Image: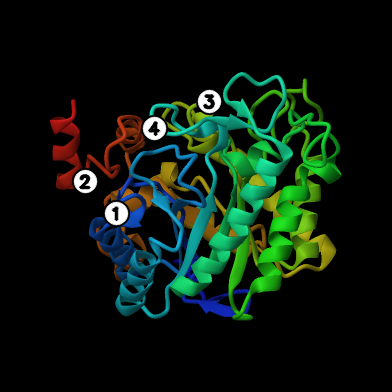
Amino acid sequence: MYTKIFEKGKLGNLTTQNRFVAQPMEGYDSVNSGQVSQRGIDKYTKLAKGGWGVIVAEAISVTSKSLSCKNGLIMNKRNLDSFKQLVDEVKQANPNAILLFQLTHSGRNSNASFSEKTTVCPGNNEGRLLSADEIQEIQDAFVFASFLTEEAGADGIDFKCCHGYFGAEILRPENTRTDKWGGSWENRSRFFRESVTSMMAQKRNKDFIIGSRFSMYEGWRGGCGTSSPDCLVEDLTEMQMLIELMAKLGMDYANVSAGIPGRTSEITRPVHGAEWMYLNHLRYTRFAKDTLLDLGSSVQVFGSAYSILKDKAFLIAEEMITKGYADYAGWGRQILADPLTPVKLQRGEAIDYCTACSGCTKMMGKQIQAGCMIHNPYYKKLWKDNL
């Protein structure tokens, strides 16, 4: 029944064992100021054993100053050995798994109780306005984190430009700065463009993958996917320009998402009563793929929002890939519910499906280790102990 999603694929110069993508899901599993804990390593090792073709490790901060979670991962020299251990154990579990590190800066999503909220947008009262020099420092941190990711042995990076974090915020029409980082699209896309260019230039391994996850439409006035600072209505003109920029820069993939968790959450991750929101993701994914096909580009497209569909997700993913609307299908919450999903599907075994209870999100809100409290006894007990 399923042939395309189990078909090998190409990501840059690398071959993937199938078209299943384990999307980055924060688990708050760090120790010792941002090092990868053994529990975190075990989580990704299990995904490798589960047969996911591409595994994207959760939001890894490029700085210790701006964090959304107190136990989040931080990429720096001090923590490098723990990331090397993560790569080694994942590759031992499944040498064919492609492991990417998602790099991020939390910006206005930072938690003020243990971090600093910042913003790039003038007139915004959600954080301290960053200076032009500080934005340059953040760009340097992203580039250095990419260098360290390659040093750790990972197959590539995911440049986080989604879900309201710094990489998305600076792209918004809402960013009306009057310096080189804001105002025009040329200026608002400068951070992304220059960062990726520098990352490409410093690569030592030609096979090192560089891609980005971005929110096509945030559902936010002046947000990504709108036409002006005061507009709420969807307009994908600039997001098409972003996708075209990815192709021009020679990036390897575009990971399509939407919305801002905690603000327009249902757009990001459809829930019961709003399941139909997944249709927007299918449309956004096809829009990205059509844009790249028109350019004759080989940039691969990852789709999202499949978890809400449970067992129906595989047929939809199969159709999207068969019809050329996407190259890969990504699951987020489902990787917490059952990290062995691909291999179980292939063997015809029963799968534990995400119930869309938002339990993992509630655990994130409490700043405790996040996982599936329905199917995983450890997280079920952890949740009860923290009520």
* Label 1: which secondary element: loop
Q: Nearer the viewer, mark 4 or mark 3?
A: 4
Answer yes or no: is residue 255 visible. Answer: no
| Residue at numbered disc 4 | 114
Q: Between disc 4 and disc 3, whose residue precedes?
A: 4
Q: CA distance from mark 1 to mark 4?
A: 32 Å
Q: Is disc 3 in contact with disc 1, using a CB cutoff of under 8 Å?
A: no
Residue depicted at 48% across the width and 35% down the height:
270
Q: Are marks 2 and 1 in contact (CB under 8 Å)?
A: yes
Q: Earlier in the sequence, mark 2 or mark 1?
A: 1
- Amino acid type, callout 2: His
Could you tell me which secondary element the residue under label 3 belongs to?
loop
Q: Amino acid at mark 3?
A: Arg
**Residue carrying label 2:** 375
- Considering the image in quadrants, where does the C terminus appear? top left
| Point 33% across, 62% down: residue | 44
Left/right of residue 67 with respect to residue 386 in the rendered view:
right
| Image x and y of residue 120, in percent | 68, 33
Mark 3–mark 2 distance (CA, rounded to whole Å): 27 Å
Q: Which residue is mark 1?
A: 338
Residue count near mark 1 (Cα–Cα under 10 Å), binned few <14, some 14–19, many ≥20: many
What element does badge 2 sit on? loop
Q: Which of the two discs, 3 and 1, labels the residue nearer the N terminus?
A: 3
Q: Which residue is mark 3?
A: 263
- Identified by mark 1, the residue type is Asp
Marks 3/1: CA–CA distance: 27 Å
Residue type at mark 4?
Phe
Q: Foreground mark, 3 or 1?
A: 3
In depth, the one of 6 and 84 nearer the eye is 84
Counting from the top left corner in percent of width and height, residue 314 is at 45, 56
